[in-house]
Image (cartoon, grey):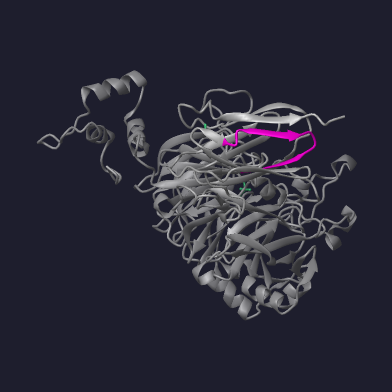
Amino acid sequence: MKRWIARAGIGAVALVALACGKPKSKGGAIAASASVKELMAARGLTEADVEAALRTYVPSGKLDDYIVFASGGQSGQVLVIGAPSMRLLKLIGVYTPEPWQGYGYGGDGDAVLEGGKQNGHALEWADVHHPNLSETNGEYDGQVLFVNDKANARVAVVDLADFMTKQIVANPLAASDHGGTFVTQNTDYVIETSQYPAPLGREYAPLAEYKEKYRGVSVFWKFDRTTKRIDPNQSWALELPPYTQDLADAGKLDSDGWVFINSFNTEMAIGGTLEGKPPIESGASQNDMDYLHVIDWKKAEKLIADGKGQPIKGIRVLPLAVSAAERVITLIGEPKSPHGVDVTPDGKEIVVGGKLDTHATVYSFEKIKKLIDAQQFEGKDAYGLPILKFSDSIRGQAEIGLGPLHTVFDDKGNAYTSVFIESVVAKWSVKELKVIEKMPVHYNIGHILAAEGDTVSPDGKFVIAMNKMSLDRFSKVGPLYPQNFQLIGIDGEKMRMLADMPIGIGEPHYAQMIRADKLKPIKTYPLGENPYIGHKDPSATVAGQEKIVRKGNVVDVYMTAIRSHFTPDQIEVEQGDTVKLHITNLEQSEDQTHGFAISMHNVQLSLEPGRHENVTFVADKPGVYPMFCTEFCSALHLEMAGYLLVKPKAK
Ligand code: K7E
Ligand code: CUA
């Protein structure tokens, strides 16, 4: 029963019968078995409930068809969820230390978190907004995941070979970001755009000089496929006007080479509530139109290569004046404080969600391109950027409802827009610009995502409503309620609500759903591999070669771990020594992970089979400290232990 049992036509009773293995009766009538009916009655389940259960239930030992990578919001992590079961598979530590994975607790992962320092500060939290999978020819390729930290303007790279965070790059120009981390169709660039305008490079300038000195910025981080890392030296940026840039999307197919970024607060309101001035929220909602930024990034790339960029904090930035003169950035009006901007799968159109306007506006890339090529502008903004006429740039508008935010697509030409104030998913025809159906969601939907949704060929199977509020959906757990992911089937005539999943670790924003068979994670590491360097660690040790080497007050310990002991298991050092542990897990069988912790030292590692880790600390407090395995690995797991002895300094 791998395929969906029924298209719209077959009723729930039929599904129940099928699920129970009851053969169809001769006359074609199908009946649920008495025991299933009893169960339904006892649990108060309707036929629709049973049908939803059958569409999402993944029995023990069976695997999900899709994997969802969801933002963990303020937790700074990424959730990995199976769909349609909506089972949580993993939390990947990204910006926040994650003890189970031994990420940020004394091992080599500390260096990744170090890379995320801003202004010399270690930042222990992040607000993860938009996970984006790497693409090849506009299809998810399952290699890498990028996520941004809205709060501190950072971008992280998660390697999907082992589902580990390998790099955090700190944006030196902006103080916050939002429109990211969108990828170009072959992942040449990962794009990160600032949210709240500020002087580039985070210099000081008074708010009175907002229009002159404050700026937005879009960083084009160059992604290197061979190293699976962002290369900051090959990256560059575009100076943007101090409109509050919001969401963004990269063009694909016809619109490859272009990026679309929308904005609010083109009024450039700066608040001042204590002085009785209007807050930013009202100042920013005065104009009927804000600006969609249309960016020719291939032209910008060329100008940067020709030396037109000016370095700020080590990044080449293309000045606004150059972008204006060379028509790298063109503006088009967009109705009142929009939110999401989403390119259609064919790359031909751009859908902007109105937020304060009830429409989704569909821009035509072909029209835009023609107007730009013919230099048919209706004017310029205060920064000299050319503006296209709104009515000449769009194909039309769809009346969606109150608070349209984000839009995703299926394989049949339909769009699905999250409608925040109405708490619905609106399904509409892109061609007809007409709403077909609205599905209520619980409650206050933010983002929406679709199976293979941002590719050139969405699957049209599921969408997930990512709801900000859950009110009456779950058992009460104190005044901070979980968020609610709602899985909705979209492969039938009508949308079907299938499952709820509470998210209790933060407020997720976006997520992407990839076909599970596109992911090819490794099962074990080659013996001695350090995942952060991608090959065998120079300090990797094999059985029989373990040793303790002392040089001055530095003690190097070359260790191994195998069921169920560490070698060596007694380490004696002197107070004040720098201790360097180099531990190789000699296991080569699947799922045979050992942990490693030392009491009182904030050291905790995860040593998956074959993996090597290095730990450095100063033994500053004399005493006896147990060191032990923290992952239940065998019947003798508790015996997998030893001692670190720190001898007091001789007086
Ligand atoms: Cu709409 Cu940050 Cu993408 Cu939240 S954003 S919902
Ligand atoms: Cu090794 Cu528990």
Is residue 28 visible in the rendered image? The answer is yes
Residue visible at 52% across and 23% down in the picture? 475
Q: Is residue 25 left or right of residue 649?
A: left
User: Dividing the picture into quarters, in which one does residue 629 lie?
Assistant: top right
In the depicted structure, whether residue 582 falls above or below residue 268: above
x, y (%) of residue 2? Answer: 29, 44
Q: Name the residue furthest left.
A: 26
Find the magenta span and give its range: 567-582
x, y (%) of residue 134? Answer: 53, 59
In the depicted structure, whether residue 255 falls above or below residue 553: below
Is 161 one of the magenta-colored residues?
no
**So how many labels did they put on this image?**
0
Q: Is residue 175 left or right of residue 350?
A: right
Q: Main secondary structure of the magenta part?
A: strand
Residue visible at 89% across and 56% down in the picture? 205
In the depicted structure, whether residue 470 falls above or below residue 307: above
In the depicted structure, whether residue 328 falls above or below residue 132: below
x, y (%) of residue 640? Answer: 54, 30
Q: Nearer the viewer, residue 449 or 21?
A: 21
Residue visible at 51% across and 52% down in the picture? 160
In the rendered view of the protein, which quadrant contains the N terminus? top left
User: Dividing the picture into quarters, in which one does residue 411 lie?
Assistant: bottom left
Q: Nearer the viewer, residue 435 or 161?
A: 161
Is residue 445 visible in the rendered image? The answer is no
x, y (%) of residue 306? Answer: 71, 80
Q: Nearer the viewer, residue 295 or 83?
A: 83
Q: Is residue 439 left or right of residue 618?
A: left
Residue visible at 78% across and 47% down in the picture? 280
In the rendered view of the protein, which quadrant contains the C terminus? top right
